[in-house]
Amino acid sequence: MFKSGFAAIIGKPNVGKSTLLNLLIGEKIAIVSHKPQATRKSVRGILSGEDYQIIFMDTPGIHKSSKKLNEVIIRYINEALDDFDVAIVITDNKGESDEIIEEYLNKIKQKNKKSILIINKIDLMDRNRIEKIKNKFKEFADFDKIIEISLTGDANAKEKILNAILDLLEEGPAYYDKDIISTETERFIISEIIREKIMNLTAQELPYHAAVVVDQMKYRDEKDMYYIKANIIVERKTHKMIIIGKNGSLIKEIGKQARMDIEHFIDKKVFLELWVKIRENWTKKEGAIKELINPRY
Ligand SMILES: Nc1nc2c(ncn2[C@@H]2O[C@H](COP(=O)(O)OP(=O)(O)OP(=O)(O)O)[C@@H](O)[C@H]2O)c(=O)[nH]1
Ligand SMILES: [Mg+2]
């Protein structure tokens, strides 16, 4: 029997949703950061096996905010919850459930679909803490499966989670060609790789004022390499100065780390050119936000 279905991955910021997507797909297609609110739109990853195909939807972290940028980001979570077969709810060591997550658990419940609770980062918790979190979540939903795990520390994490999902999926067709691992464009994933380096190499607030758009991507036959030009968009001159760094040292490091990941991703040599541009108050304008966090490539 061939099984298939859509699995929505949801949870608060920083719990490990994108880590899970990358682990399941076996490729880095989603941005991962120690800073919260890394993911800004739903990102699809497709896993095809001999007798199954699962379409995963990584989503932005659930949180409340009155900021325009976050308001737009949160809408992407609801879109992913429009249509799914299995909800994968993730929590971490910080995570007793609370009002905002309960609202989403209720939404899932109403849909009458399957659900899995993943209690992640057990490497950072003792037994008491794990039980406390589990009981709190159980108050608000009847999960079909509960998995306690460390996504970064358990070599069998992928297998355990995949088996749990396959157990809950029903018979269905393959929706995509089995060689496709994401419906995102190469350009989008490349822009996210660059944004990940910005998130991880700059201090507290800056990443929340930055977006990345790939402007050009050309294959150069004679050199057998890709030439990629990307714009880093920030809100103010001070942001631009931070990104560039002393004598250009920071943008150089961002470029170096991003290039290595991009080369691994597209399996070709890359020449990466980065430009920093200022677009005042882009995080406050809906049009600009949509254009910059989900560009039409
Ligand atoms: N200690 C520990 N850290 C983990 C584990 N799993 C993930 N992390 C770390 O948690 C951080 C957040 O991971 P992400 O995958 O970016 O989390 P996310 O839920 O996608 O976050 P947002 O996109 O911001 O909502 C990263 O630094 C991961 O390396 C784990 O099992 N143990
Ligand atoms: Mg994420």
Image (cartoon, grey):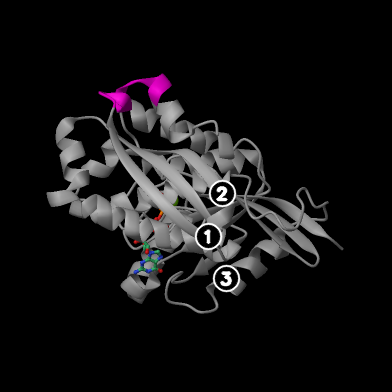
Query: Residue 265's mark?
Result: 1
Indicate left or right for 112 with 128 as reference. Answer: right
Q: Quadrant of residue 261?
A: bottom left
Q: List the residue tagged with mark 2.
A: 219
Contact check, label 1 and label 3, Cβ < 8 Å: no
Q: List the residue tagged with mark 3.
A: 158
Q: Is residue 112 magenta?
A: no
Q: Which residues are magenta?
A: 279-288
Q: Secondary structure at mark 2?
A: strand
Q: Residues within 10 Å of mark 3 (few under 14, many from 20)?
A: some
Which percent across, then down, holds residue 169?
73, 57
Identify the amino acid type marked 2.
Tyr
Mark toward the start of the polypeptide (1 vs 3): 3
Q: Secondary structure at mark 1?
A: helix
Identify the amino acid type marked 1.
Phe
Q: Secondary structure at mark 3?
A: helix
Which percent across, then down, holds residue 50?
79, 67
Which percent across, then down, holds residue 260?
41, 63
Structural distance between the alpha carbons of marks 1 and 2:
15 Å
Mark toward the start of the polypeptide (3 vs 2): 3
Identify the amino acid type marked 3.
Lys
Mark toward the start of the polypeptide (1 vs 2): 2
Residue nearest the observer in this picture, 41 or 67: 41
Who's the residue at 53% across and 60% down the image?
265
Query: Residue 249's mark?
Result: none
> Does residue 260 lie above or below 150 as drawn?
above
The kind of secondary structure the magenta stretch mainly shows is helix
Residue nearest the observer in this picture, 37 or 227: 227
Q: Residues within 10 Å of mark 1 (few under 14, many from 20)?
A: some
Which percent across, then down, holds residue 167?
71, 65
